Image (cartoon, rainbow, N blue to C red):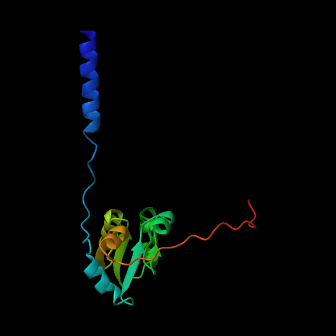
Amino acid sequence: MKKLALTLLLATAVMFGQQGQGKKGPASQAHVLTNAEFDDLLQHPDQILIIDVRRPDEITANGGFPVYLSIQNNQLAQSLAWIPKDRTIVTVSNHAARGGGAADILAKAGFKVAGTIGAQTYEQAGGKITHITAPPPNPNAKKE
């Protein structure tokens, strides 16, 4: 009887612990751009601003677009004052999830946001991105 009670207790604990898994926060309201839509925007570089919200190591590992502002999501709210408002903004992350959240923040702050795009998704669909090769470490650099 004790084994049965312990087994039921354990099964119940596992079941309740798994209920929250797989749930995400509210979906972004940002439009996820198609490759064609993004390519059209790129035809007017003087009218757009690309904000990449990925970490620098993600940009180095996965590639990105040749000209962009790098502002991670956790720094976006403090950076609003120096982001130009005269351009249409496209946010970038690997698969557009973080970019969508950033686009929502920017749109709520009054910026004109075209949408978001995932750099990896764009490349997988045939788009061309820039791959950055990190320079080798300088053997003569002084260690602090």
Nearer to the camera, 112 or 68: 68
- Left/right placement of residue 16 relative to residue 127 reads left
Residue visible at 24% across and 21% down in the picture: 8
x then y, percent, for residue 125:
29, 72
Q: Is residue 86 visible?
A: no
Say above or below: 126 vs 137.
below
Residue visible at 42% across and 71% down in the picture: 52
x then y, percent, for residue 115:
29, 74
- Left/right placement of residue 139 relative to residue 8 reads right
Nearer to the camera, 47 or 66: 66
Nearer to the camera, 74 or 57: 57
Q: Quadrant of the N terminus?
A: top left
Q: Is residue 96 visible?
A: yes
Say above or below: 39 vs 100.
below
Residue visible at 28% across and 30% down in the picture: 14
Q: Quadrant of residue 136?
A: bottom right
Say above or below: 143 vs 33.
above
- Left/right placement of residue 65 relative to residue 110 reads right
Residue visible at 26% across and 69% down in the picture: 30
x then y, percent, for residue 99:
35, 67
Task: Please state the total of marks drawn on the protein image.
Answer: 0
Q: Quadrant of the C terminus?
A: bottom right
Q: Quadrant of residue 50?
A: bottom left
x then y, percent, for residue 141:
74, 66
